[in-house]
Amino acid sequence: MKNKEKIIGSIAILCISIIFIIVGFALSSQKGNVNATDYKDIFVEGDKTTEVDKSIQADKTAEKKQAAGVIAASANIVEDINIKVDIKGAVKVPGVYEIKKDSRVTDLIKLAGGVTDDADLNVTNLSEKLKDEECVMIYKKGEKDKVQDLQGNITSPTISSPTASTTTKDAIINLNTATKEELKTLTGVGDIKADAIIKYREENGGFKTVEELTKVGGIGEKTLSKFIDKVDIK
């Protein structure tokens, strides 16, 4: 009885082993039947993915170039619509400013911090359009008249004859012909300053303007203001 059981058990084990062998062989046969075309499809898919990536990168590069071109064009437009103008004189912060094209003088004054208290806006055209590389002068009160007189005297200087001067105290004294004694009649002018005035006019070919007296040693604007209405160069 025991021998029969052993025989039956051995047969069962053998059958199970055969089944496992058959199943294993079937599975390995399926793996071996994979066609080369299957691998080809895999590589083709990989190539397609690479081409897509390259296309995306190319699009990104094109976008960057386009953006750079737009930025450069914008910079050129900004340069075209802006100009640089110099402003001098009676403003709080004189200097060179960058301002929009076709701006007015009043706009430039605002950029320069406004005018000073002694500015004379009556002689300035605030509505005038600005031009590139232009220099705008804001005059102080009474300054423009002096500049115009100076320009007129430089273009057509006139020197009077010695007989034109006078020795009277209330008469106008000609700086280019007056004697030392005549010069000493001026307020604040003594021997030393009179000699300095005569020396200066001899070395420089006479005075071109009354204001040129401030170039003489010892005579400043304050001294000149005391007798400016009593002297002339004509």
Image (spheres, rainbow, N blue to C red):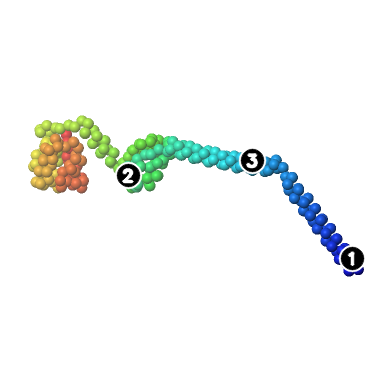
> Mark 1 = which residue?
4
- Few, some or many C-alpha atoms within 10 Å of disc 1 (few <14, some 14-19, many ≥20)? few
Q: Amino acid at mark 2?
A: Ala
Residue 130 drawn at (x, y percent): 39, 36
Label 3 sits on a secondary structure element that is helix
Given this view, does label 2 or label 1 mark the residue nearer the observer? 1
> Mark 3 = which residue?
48
Which quadrant is the C terminus positioned in? top left
> Mark 2 = which residue?
90
Q: Amino acid at mark 3?
A: Lys
Q: Residue at x 40, y 38 (%)?
A: 83
Residue 120 drawn at (x, y percent): 33, 42
CB atoms of marks 3 and 2 within 8 Å: no
C-alpha span from label 2 to label 1? 131 Å
Name which of mark 3 and mark 2 comes first in the sequence: 3
Given this view, does label 3 or label 1 mark the residue nearer the observer? 1
Residue 153 drawn at (x, y percent): 21, 34
**Which quarter of the figure has residue 123?**
top left
Q: Residue at x 35, y 42 (%)?
A: 96
**Which quarter of the figure has residue 155?**
top left
Name which of mark 3 and mark 1 comes first in the sequence: 1
Q: Residue at x 41, y 40 (%)?
A: 99
- Few, some or many C-alpha atoms within 10 Å of disc 2 (few <14, some 14-19, many ≥20)? many
